[in-house]
Image: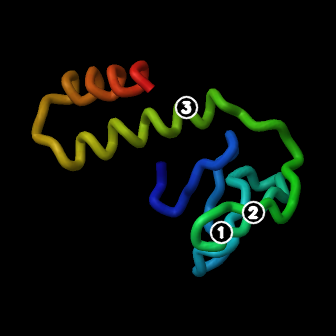
């Protein structure tokens, strides 16, 4: 996952501006927005689509592989295997 993205309730969000208070849906055709008050995400605007859990899972899985490759000197096969194990244990 991109460092400027968050996942919340099955939706992916990106920062709407330079502050980390308002987050908007990653889909350009959607008006979904949430506000982060320091502890909780509060819905500001409804989404124009249903959540896509498959996309959320895919993004998180790819993010785990990328972060594993960044901090480890293990072979890629081992990093992917570890990400799969972690994913199925959750």
Q: Is residue 45 left or right of residue 58?
A: right
Determine which of the numbered discs, if any, sits on residue 57 in the image. Answer: 3
- Report helix, strand or loop for mark 1: strand
The earlier-in-sequence mark between 1 and 2 is: 1
Determine which of the numbered discs, if any, sits on residue 36 in the image. Answer: 1
Q: Residue furthest front?
A: 39
Disc 2 target residue: 42
| Residue at 55% over, 57% down | 5
Q: Is residue 76 above or below residue 11?
A: above
Q: Is residue 11 above or below residue 13?
A: above
Q: Quadrant of residue 88?
A: top left
- State which mark lies toward you, 2 or 3: 2
Q: Count residues near mark 1 (Cα–Cα under 10 Å), then give few for <14, some for 14-19, many for 20+.
A: few
* Mark pair 1, 3: CA separation: 22 Å
* Mark pair 2, 3: CA separation: 22 Å
Q: Count residues near mark 2 (Cα–Cα under 10 Å), then give few for <14, some for 14-19, many for 20+.
A: few
| Residue at 89% over, 47% down | 48
Q: Which sits in the foreground, 88 or 75?
A: 88
Q: Is residue 42 left or right of residue 38?
A: right
In percent of width and height, residue 61 lies at 44, 33
* Mark pair 1, 2: CA separation: 6 Å
Q: Are marks 2 and 3 in contact (CB under 8 Å)?
A: no
In percent of width and height, residue 14 lies at 62, 61
């Amino acid at each position: 996952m991109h460092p400027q993205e968050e996942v919340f309730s099955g939706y992916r969000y990106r920062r709407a501006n330079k502050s980390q208070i308002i987050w908007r849906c990653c889909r350009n055709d959607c008006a979904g927005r949430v506000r982060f008050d320091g502890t909780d995400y509060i819905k500001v605007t409804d989404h124009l689509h249903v959540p896509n859990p498959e996309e959320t899972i895919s993004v998180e899985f790819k993010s785990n592989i990328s972060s594993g490759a960044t901090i480890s000197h293990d072979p890629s096969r081992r990093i992917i295997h570890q990400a799969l194990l972690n994913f199925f244990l959750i």
